[in-house]
Amino acid sequence: MSASQTVRTGGALDLPDRALAACVACGLCLPHCPTYRVTGDERRSPRGRIALMRAVDSGATQPDAEWLESMDTCLLCRGCEPACPSVVPFGELMAGTRIAVSRGRRVPVVLRVGLFVLVRPRLLRFGSRLLAVLQRLHLLPGGLPLPARLPLGDPRRPGRSDGDVVLFTGCVMDAWQPEVHAAVEAVLEATGATVTRSGDSAGCCGALHAHAGLEEAARSLASRVMAALPADVPVLVDSAGCGAALLDYGSLLGTPEAVAFSARVSDVHAWLAENLERMPEPEVGERTTVIVQDPCHLRHAQGCHGSVRTVLASYVDTVELDDEGLCCGAGGAFSVLQPGLATDVRRRKTASIQRAAAASGTEVVVSANPGCALHLAAAGHDVRHPLEMVAERIRPASGYTDGR
Ligand code: SF4
Ligand code: SF4
């Protein structure tokens, strides 16, 4: 059944009817929910949140501050979905709830300012340069989710417009982590692909707007991205969060054009895993070992986390974490809006990384999502993008020079 055909409850939240009714309250999702794991509070669990959604949707109760807190503290990691025997689409329920709630509510100032800047690339680069100066002068407090060295100059690269793949460059990642896009572009070119960068004209994917329930803004950004990338070539994404958002444009906009656009979108690791025979042999450096962290938007939203391992296998050895993909606590803007809970959730991930590091002797973590990478780096971890590891080993073939 398509999104437009979904029967909705018609209640206060107007959620998909069958999805809301599907939960049988078995509780099998509870151990997979990071916010339940750190709080032990049923209202911070998938089961509890669904019960609270039902209560408000049916009109049995009103959404008071405690109810809103239960919804706001969800990371939207969707770690509960694969554990659910009733296949409850929890992400869809929470997204619908956020949309309903956002209609009568002011967006927190910090989020409003952040979202305003994200969709204005020149302002974002200007603000990033100011932050870079403050960072060089050691005037920024520690523990912020920022790269170790923000770029001082303009991180954009001149690009071609006729590539046979598009690399989606997004907003923050383009401004803060240009070395990641450079590495990914080098790996793609080493396969023989020609690369067009999506750049400023496509801009932000709208993932954070969608997370916050700002549906109209998310739709507007989705339309802008689609209009900027009309050529019928694959759109490859090196940020798991952006990739999940682009893949959702079909259901967000509900048009045949949006469905066709989403069908062109792939996580870059998934695309490379399908084109392994085109990847070059490692030519430089030693075979090292890395700890793999699965971003929720790769593992639960896109289900292609295995591709990261497939692509890395020829270049580095990989070590698994022992926490079954539990969220790291980054969650888009969650680490800014819910810093205490984000830190508590991250503590579990850090403990798992430390166990993996002790067993393997490596400290290097790879993450395919910039939000996770920055959140974990703020806790002192050495985090790289998986394709930076590949680019460094194929350097002569790729011409890649931007490694740290
Ligand atoms: S999406 Fe994540 S944080 Fe939210 S209820 Fe599910 S497991 Fe818990
Ligand atoms: S596992 Fe599924 S059915 Fe069981 S409580 Fe959680 S959401 Fe409900």
Image (tube, helix red, strand yellow):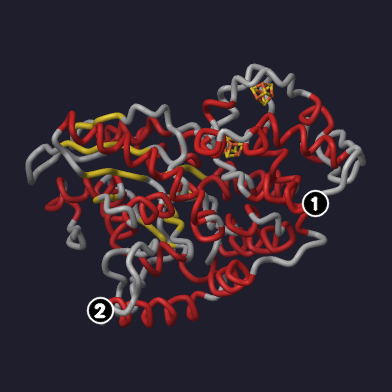
Tell me if residue 377 comes above or below residue 81 in the rendering: below
Tell me the kind of residue under disc 1.
Asp
Q: Residue at (47%, 46%) from the top-left corner?
A: 329
Tell me the kind of residue under disc 2.
Arg
Q: Residue at (31%, 82%) from the top-left corner?
A: 133
- Per the model, the C-alpha gap separating discs 2 and 1 is 44 Å
Mark 1 element type: loop
Mark 2 or 1, closer to the camera: 1
How would you rate the neighbour count of disc 1 (Cα within 10 Å): few for under 14, some for 14-19, many for 20 or more?
few
Image quadrant holding the C terminus, namely: bottom left
Q: Which residue is mark 2?
A: 136
Which mark, residue 218?
A: none
Q: How many marks?
A: 2
Nearer to me, 152 or 109? 109
Q: Residue at (62%, 63%) from the top-left corner?
A: 227
Q: Position of residue 75 (x, y in %)?
A: 57, 45
Q: Residue at (58%, 70%) from the top-left corner?
A: 110
How would you rate the neighbour count of disc 2 (Cα within 10 Å): few for under 14, some for 14-19, many for 20 or more?
few
> Earlier along the polypeptide chain: callout 2 or callout 1?
1
Mark 2 element type: helix
Tell me if residue 295 comes above or below residue 322 in the rendering: below
Q: Position of residue 368 (x, y in %)?
A: 38, 46
